[in-house]
């Protein structure tokens, strides 16, 4: 008999909370169950099939007959609990089409709006005088300013194909190792850490990587591709999944005809190598955010609209990207294409009109 490795225990008088953070299941144990579990943790071999507590702990998944694989984790248990505990969040009913998603999302929004909203501004001392700032100046080359002003999240795409040249530009300027900066180095930079992207990276490690989901790119067969930053090249990993893209992305089926998507992953082993403390775990998400924003601004400058999400089925995505069981993990998804510019999909707009009529 074995103890499930994906447990943490919280003392909560008068009992004990045992949380299976991988399966998102919580159990509350009284003193008898807590004492028996402590003995089983000390020696799982004392498991007794005739002991009702033992069998209930087994049925609850706190104990397991077979040893569960517990992949290497280079930081402390707290970051591991957070990472695994926030994967594959269960949903009572995952939307199977755009109409189900629209109804569920509208219901969720109505539930949120039924509660008092927090204040728009943070609390400030009454004596704090507001200093009015001057109007922003125009940049010498206002292309960046235009991209910043025009970038918006859209949920309605035409399905029109985009060009391979646009894809190449997007990937090079967001994830590529910029050859224009090859001479921008000095003796303080260690060998192997000279590569520079347009976005900052924790420790100069470039721990984040990109996988392209190409659905409708002229000159590129549909499929899942790994982007190789140093070579500025793609390699085919898998064909597109048979099910709709929305099934991977939390039931958000309005995105099914998105021509191009990018899964941003993090190589935790690179971060473990340089930073042993799990505060570096934060940096993986910060870096993914930098890359996401760069991607969106480049896409906007190319005349494309963008959409992004952190809601996806981790295990499905890991399998699709060919990184299951590795130290590389998916963190974020961003995509782009030709859009009518609508922040909400047509199905949701229709549903809102019907409910307001």
Image (cartoon, rainbow, N blue to C red):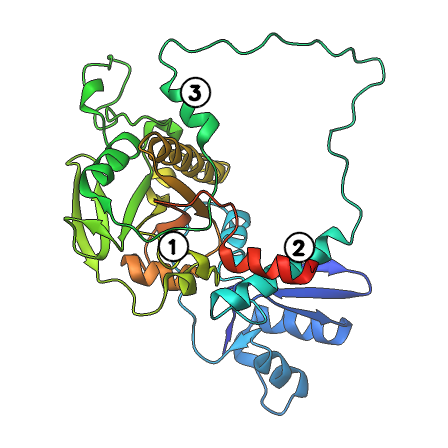
Q: CA distance from mark 1 to mark 3?
A: 44 Å
The reply, left or right, for residue 22 in relation to residue 303 is: right
Question: In the rendered image, which quarter contains the C terminus?
Answer: bottom right
Q: Earlier in the sequence, mark 1 or mark 2?
A: 1
Quadrant assignment, res 123? top right
- Is the residue marked by circle 3 packed among few (<14), some (14-19), or many (20+) residues within 10 Å? some
**CB within 8 Å, label 1 to label 3:** no
Q: Is residue 51 visible?
A: yes
User: Among all residues in the image, which is located at the extreme front?
Assistant: 357
Q: Which element type, helix, strand or loop, lies under badge 1?
A: loop
Residue depicted at x 85% and y 18%: 126
Q: Position of residue 274 (x, y in %)?
A: 36, 33
Q: Is residue 70 visible?
A: no
Of 196 and 293, nearer the camera is 293
Q: CA distance from mark 1 to mark 2?
A: 39 Å
Q: Which element type, helix, strand or loop, lies under badge 2?
A: helix
Marks counted in the figure total 3
User: Among all residues in the image, which is located at the extreme right?
Assistant: 126
**CB within 8 Å, label 3 to label 2:** no
Residue under numbered circle 2: 109
Quadrant assignment, res 233? top left
- Is the residue marked by circle 1 packed among few (<14), some (14-19), or many (20+) residues within 10 Å? few
Residue under numbered circle 3: 145
Of 177 and 352, nearer the camera is 352
Q: Position of residue 140 (x, y in %)?
A: 38, 8
- Is the residue marked by circle 2 packed among few (<14), some (14-19), or many (20+) residues within 10 Å? few
Residue depicted at x 42% and y 23%: 146
Q: CA distance from mark 3 to mark 2?
A: 32 Å
Residue under numbered circle 1: 72
Of 6 and 46, nearer the camera is 6
Q: Is residue 132 above or below residue 331?
A: above
Q: Is residue 184 above or below residue 339?
A: above
């Amino acid at each position: 008999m074995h103890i499930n490795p994906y447990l943490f225990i919280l003392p909560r008088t008068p009992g004990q909370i045992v949380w299976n953070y991988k399966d998102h299941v919580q159990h509350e144990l009284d003193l008898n169950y807590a004492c028996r579990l402590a003995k089983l943790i000390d020696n799982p071999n004392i498991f007794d099939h005739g002991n009702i507590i033992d069998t209930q702990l087994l049925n609850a998944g706190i104990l397991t007959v077979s040893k569960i694989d517990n992949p290497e984790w280079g930081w402390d248990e707290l970051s591991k609990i957070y990472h695994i505990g926030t994967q594959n969040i269960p949903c009572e009913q995952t939307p199977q089409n755009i109409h189900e998603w629209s109804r569920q999302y509208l219901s969720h929004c109505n539930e949120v709006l039924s509660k008092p909203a927090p204040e728009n501004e943070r609390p400030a001392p009454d004596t704090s005088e507001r200093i009015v700032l001057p109007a922003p100046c125009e940049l010498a080359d206002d292309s960046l300013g235009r991209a910043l002003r025009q970038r918006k999240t859209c949920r309605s795409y035409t399905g029109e194909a985009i060009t391979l040249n646009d894809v190449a530009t997007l990937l090079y300027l967001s994830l590529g190792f910029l050859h224009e900066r090859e001479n921008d180095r000095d003796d303080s930079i260690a060998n192997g850490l000279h590569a520079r992207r347009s976005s900052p990276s924790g420790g100069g490690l470039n721990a984040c990587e990109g996988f392209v989901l190409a659905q409708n790119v002229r000159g590129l067969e549909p499929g899942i591709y790994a982007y190789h930053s140093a070579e500025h090249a793609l390699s085919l990993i898998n064909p597109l999944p048979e099910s709709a893209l929305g099934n991977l992305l939390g039931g958000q089926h309005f995105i099914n005809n998105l021509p191009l998507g990018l899964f941003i992953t993090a190589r935790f082993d690179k971060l473990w190598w340089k930073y042993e403390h799990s505060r570096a775990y934060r940096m993986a998400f910060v870096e993914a955010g930098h890359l996401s924003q760069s991607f969106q601004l480049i896409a906007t400058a190319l005349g494309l609209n963008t959409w992004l999400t952190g809601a996806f089925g981790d295990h499905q995505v890991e399998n699709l990207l060919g990184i299951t069981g590795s130290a590389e993990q998916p963190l974020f998804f961003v995509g782009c294409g030709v859009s009518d510019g609508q922040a909400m999909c047509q199905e949701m707009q229709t549903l809102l009109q019907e409910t307001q009529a």
